Amino acid sequence: MTTFTLSTTQKNNPLLLCKGFTYTVDKTSDDKTYWKCEHARTLKCKGRAHTNYINTIMLYETDNHNHPGSAVSSEIRIFEEKIRGRAVHCNETTQTIIDNCLTNLSDATVARLPDFKHIKRNIQHHCAKNDLPKIPHDKTFDPIPDKLATTKGNSKFLQFDSGPGNDCLLIFSSVDQLQLLDNCEELLVDGTFKVTPTIFYQLYTMHVAYRNAVIPVVFALLPNKNQQTYQRLINELAELCPL
């Protein structure tokens, strides 16, 4: 199966990176996304790719490019996207953002990066757009702001908030994700501890099998791993997705 990476431009338009080539969206249908080489207009390149509608599976790819690909250029795009994302969405120092984004980059890519003074200026520019609240350090934190409780489309994302306290339970899911959960026949669950905020015990996730893909549908922050807590989670989800 062909592997690929999804990325975005500085204007947040989707990109598909595969085998050193970069594709932009040509058109979409109910079940597919059609991609064209980024040089389709400038170089008349006929490189094309098709993915399923949620962009998780490569359905078709042609190597009919009239120019060489560059794995280094693809790595640089991913690095720049990570820089933008962490600067806007994370409360980290400039150097921490750079250190995190440099992880696993090849020596050839590092050698091709812009001057680090330029990278730092870009980070500081994007950080100016970061109006996230400070990360809380105890469970008596203020109500979660709307920016973190809604999707980019301004639909509800924080589906349940038990309120502050030692037994605080938060459930995040979009309306579409809840619908997939409600209609699923296969459910996969996992508890993650490494990326969990320090005031919670674990991030508990649920995924469903849908159209030959596994899609995350629920993200729950739990105070512990007690049976009673899991039962609370199930009860709340049953309220959100009544049979």
Image: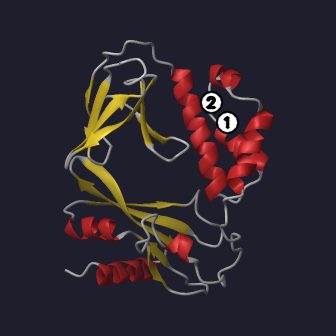
**Mark 2, residue position:** 105
Locate residue 131 relative to residue 149 in the image: left or right: right
- Side of 51 where 88 appears, left or right: right
Q: Quadrant of the N terminus?
A: top left
**Amino acid under label 1?**
Leu
Q: Secondary structure at mark 2?
A: loop
Across and down, in percent, residue 155 comes to: 40, 72
For the point 77% across and 43% down, which residue is it? 121
In this picture, residue 84 sits left or right of residue 232: right
Q: Is residue 168 above or below residue 44?
A: below
Q: How far from the left and from the top, in percent, is residue 220?
A: 46, 70
Residue at position x 25%, y 54% in the image: 209
Residue furthest out toward the front: 42
Cα separation, mark 1 vs mark 2, equals 6 Å
Q: Which residue is mark 1?
A: 102
Q: Position of residue 152 (x, y in %)?
A: 46, 63
Whether residue 195 is visible here, answered yes or no, is yes
Q: Nearer the viewer, residue 188 or 58?
A: 58
- Residue type for callout 2: Leu
